[in-house]
Amino acid sequence: MLYIIEDTINGILMGSIYGLTAMGLTIIFGVLKVINFAHGSMLMVGMYVTYWAVTLTGINPYLAIVIVAPVMFFFGYYLQDIVIKPIFIAEKNVREPITVIIVTTGIWYILDNLTLLIFGPQYRSLADNPWRSKMLEFGDLFISVPKLYGCIIAIVTAAAIYWFFQKTSMGRAIRATSMDREAASLQGINQYKIYNLAFGIGSATAGIAAVTLVPFNNVFPTVGVLFDIKGFIIVVLGGLGSIGGALVGGIIVGLIESVGPQFMTATWTEAIVYGLFLVVLFVKPSGLFGQKHDW
Amino acid sequence: MALLVVKDMTKQFGGLRAVDSLNLQIEEGQIFGLIGPNGAGKSTAFNCIAGLFPPTAGEITFDGKNINGSKPWDLCKQGLARTFQIVKPFGSKSVLYNVTVGSFATTNSRSEAEAKALKVLEYLNFADKKDILAANLTIADRKRLEIAKALATEPKLLLLDEVMAGLRPNEVDEMVEILKNLRNRGITIFVIEHIMRAIMALSDRIVVIQFGKKIAEGTPDEIANNEKVIKAYLGEDYAVA
Amino acid sequence: MNEKQINRLAGIGLLVIAFGLPLVVRSATYLHIVVLLYFYAYLTTSWNLVGGFAGVLPLGHAAFVGIGAYTSTILSLQYGISPWLGMLVGGVIATIVGVLIGLPTFKMRGAYFALATIAFAEGIRVIVENVDYIGPLKVNGPRGLQIPPLETGLVNYMFASKEPYYYIILVMLLLVLFLTWFISRSKLGYYLNAGGEEPEAAMALGINVARAKLIAMAMSSFLTALAGTFYAQFSLYIHPKSIISLDLSFEIAFIALIGGRGSIAGPILGALLLRPVGDFSRIYFGDTLPGMHLIIFGLVLILVMHYQPRGLQEPLTRLYKSLVARLIGKTTGGGQEHGIARS
């Protein structure tokens, strides 16, 4: 029984971190209507930035957010502006620009393999890292501290993004574009600038997620792929474009992964996650929080 | 005989009643106009009839059959075709290809479909542009293509959603002629239009809606002289036109 | 000579070259590379039925390759059934799976379909990697299946040299090309194109868009699975990482987009460009610069999408047409381009 409680708590904690990794994906989709296949790579880049920032300056890994988030924001902003935007413009009459989606996979391939070339395939983790296996003890109950921090950061980030989209004028402009590009551009909103911003914000979120991961996760060139696929499942579970949905979807996946092994071999839990994904597609294809009509 | 009967049709979007208990009846061979200020629910009414989404309440009968909730593609096969207010050409394809897609509704053979499409294009004085990519057409030609595609499905009833918006006056006149010719060939036409001059010249009968509700119905003359209509909507517009 | 005759001549010329190639290329290594090139061209052409014509983005076709390969191999190893028969069984299973994925997702935005195909392919890979048996069927987990040598010959789908494999995949490729050409000129082809480009307009013209896409998906899954059997018999060893991998799924999509999605020549052109680029950069950079070939893939992809979003087939078709026009001594009118190549 105790194990189940412990696994449930850890599942929720890890799940909210998953949700955080997927949040940028859902923001970018919500505005650009494009799945960013490079999102896992952005997470990976964020992890390397975090790793080097901490290793070179020796700052507290969680303080690295003040470096990583802005760096990733500008990286995403200009990646969209320089690489993706021209393709958007070339295909502006196309309802769903598949070329843009495929270009993000090109970016994924380049980023992952460039990292492999530069930093090599080895796994890296922070030196003298006091967080890695730090536990909070409640009697016999053990809770991972870095995951707890990650969960808190995930909730704060989600709340901040929600606030930004609801309350600030820039956030409202982004939302207006996400609902109706043509109407928004008629009101003088520059559609492509909004795309840059959304991509920047999505990437910054990936950066924040990276910061929460580095204290207890290894850093290596293909680390993003793991979270990429998981992220796709999470955003569909929660409803593409829904920020709260990403968090809930993440927690569902986290719970399956951590409680599941009590009942079966751990590897099967992965198959169960895919199975659940397909079930949701059949039963409620728009996800738990998605809009019903999505043409 | 009535080709289309709409009875107490209501469409609700959340708290908004876009169409409110609309009643209308279109006789075979008529040109029937639907007008109203922006946001009056005209396109919503069209979309319900054409099967894009089902009405919340009410009954739609086409050609003697209840068509509530029928899918657009089934309606098309039954003889109900439509155009879109925002034209939707298959931009990467030629004009002929676009129209051939429509004529496949009545045949499985490509050569037959193409021959039918060509006939429609000739009928609309459009055949000289058959090899142009749809994306490269002018607005007027896009509207014409929209009609050509719908016509190619060989409809009994044609729903036209603002096919004259954005046209120059001489192009409007040409379009009015085309539509009159179509009616003379036995096609019933249900038209939404903003250009008063055109709809007054064209329609046998007109329904005016405002906030989803019918406020008047009658011949163009009756509508033009209807106090309610003039107050609600026609006032300035008609004076200008 | 008129344009039609020149086209026919060029076609016959290409066929002669294709069928005569093994008489000239005697190196098994090079022939191996060409066989794989045809294999990829075949996969991409099958992919193109749904990814090109139907205007959606399937990113899990490796699952169908895997279903084909595993089905025929298991049936042959455990029950002694000829791979030719197993190939058809695999095709049928893949068709059912393909339809099941398409059923809920074709009514949604394209993104859902893309994600569903990925998740499904990954799900299948995870299962195959983690179990030794599915019911009575031995899939042997991550170790994969080895096909022991049998008597060579057509019946066992096993040959001592590369040439028979070359001709099998060549004929498969030609058949699937012919099928695509035929469909693109049929009602289904028109319906797929229309539904892919403007679904609402297509529906209003009497097209049940989701059903047309399902038909395309069924055919595409079936044809893709057939290639899985070919791959199994050609390499005599299959394991989940090699054939049910995301990399394979993506490479197929890359080839299609670079060559020209929705055109008949596109997959061939894409495979002709991308496969050698991949093979040679792997050979030259494989040891010193791991991953270099994937960087090159990514760069080629981004550049082509940037400058030729309709793929390389568009400028190449234009080039070919102007060459033909020059041959028959007619000047080309620049304004006469109307995208026949894509139709």
Image (spheres, grey):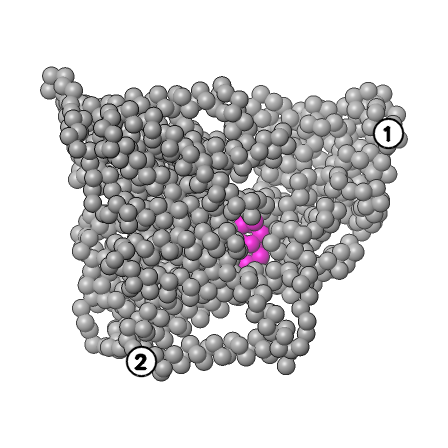
Query: For the point 75% across and 40% down, which residue is it?
Result: B166
Residue C242 lies in the magenta stretch = no
Q: Position of residue A106 (x, y in %)?
A: 40, 49
Q: Position of residue A2 (x, y in %)?
A: 14, 22
User: Quadrant where the N terminus of chain B lies?
Assistant: top right
Helix, strand or loop status at disc 1:
helix
Q: Position of residue A85 (x, y in %)?
A: 51, 42
Tell whether A108 sits left or right of B120. left
How many residues crowd around disc 2 within 10 Å: few (fewer than 14), some, or many (20 or more)? few
User: What residue is pinned by disc 1?
Assistant: B240
User: What residue is pinned by disc 2?
Assistant: C26
Query: For the point 19% across and 63% down, which residue is it?
Result: C146
Q: Nearer the viewer, residue A191 or C265?
A: A191
Tell whether B211 sits left or right of C315. right
User: Eyeballing the image, is B163 above or below B131?
Assistant: above
The amino acid type, in three-letter code, at marker 2 is Arg
Helix, strand or loop status at disc 2:
loop
Determine which quarter of the picture holds residue A66. top left
